[in-house]
Image: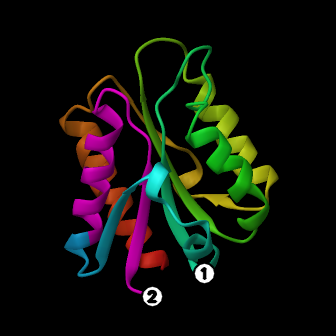
Amino acid sequence: MDKVNIIFWSGTGNTAVMAGEIAEGVKETGKEAAVIPVSEADIEELKQAKAFALGCPSMGDEVLEESEMEPFMQALESEISGKQILLFGSYGWGNQEWMRDWEKRIADAGAVVVDGGGITANYEPDAETKEELREAGRVLAGLV
């Protein structure tokens, strides 16, 4: 499969920008990037994938978005053992606890977090973070 799925939820647009940067990195390798809002994501398709990306900003008390992303994660969790998952998301305050919790959750489900940790941006990603996201897209493309 030469398609890389990049599933995300974004409230202000910052996490959507991050998804787009990952997609640019994927495209640089000649592979197809599918940037998909979580409300349109297909768990059955992700079951077949070796690797994919998930993005969500920190919400409320440093948790995943609760109406779409959290239910999606609950449904996906039992299907990700052995997969490689790139995590990303933006935040506006706090100490990025939501990302550490998400990384642990992915590992506890038997999957591997690509590059050992999620990529975060305080509000909109800066130029350095955008390059990190593009590089992560290139790495992710090499895993599918």
Circle 2 packing at 10 Å, graded few (<14), some (14-19), many (20+), is: few
Q: Label 2 near label 1: C-beta < 8 Å?
A: yes
Identify residue type, mark 1: Gln
Query: Disc 1 marks which residue?
Result: 48
Q: Which residues are magenta?
A: 1-26
Magenta segment includes 25 = yes
Residue at image point 30% right, 69% down: 26
Residue 49 point in image, percent of width and height: 56, 77
- Residue 109: quarter of image: bottom right
Residue at image point 24% right, 48% down: 131
Circle 1 packing at 10 Å, graded few (<14), some (14-19), many (20+), is: few
Q: Nearer the viewer, residue 127 or 17?
A: 17
* Left or right relative to 15: residue 119: right
Residue 14 point in image, percent of width and height: 30, 32
Is residue 2 placed above or below 44 in the rendered structure? below
Magenta segment includes 56 = no
Residue 47 point in image, percent of width and height: 64, 74
Identify residue type, mark 2: Met
- Residue 27: quarter of image: bottom left
Dot 1 or dot 2, earlier in sequence: 2
Is residue 53 placed above or below 69 in the rendered structure? below
**Which residue is the extreme one toward the bottom?**
1
Query: Disc 2 marks which residue?
Result: 1
* Left or right relative to 83: residue 118: left
Label 2's element? loop
Residue at image point 54% right, 70% down: 51
Q: Which mark is residue 72?
A: none
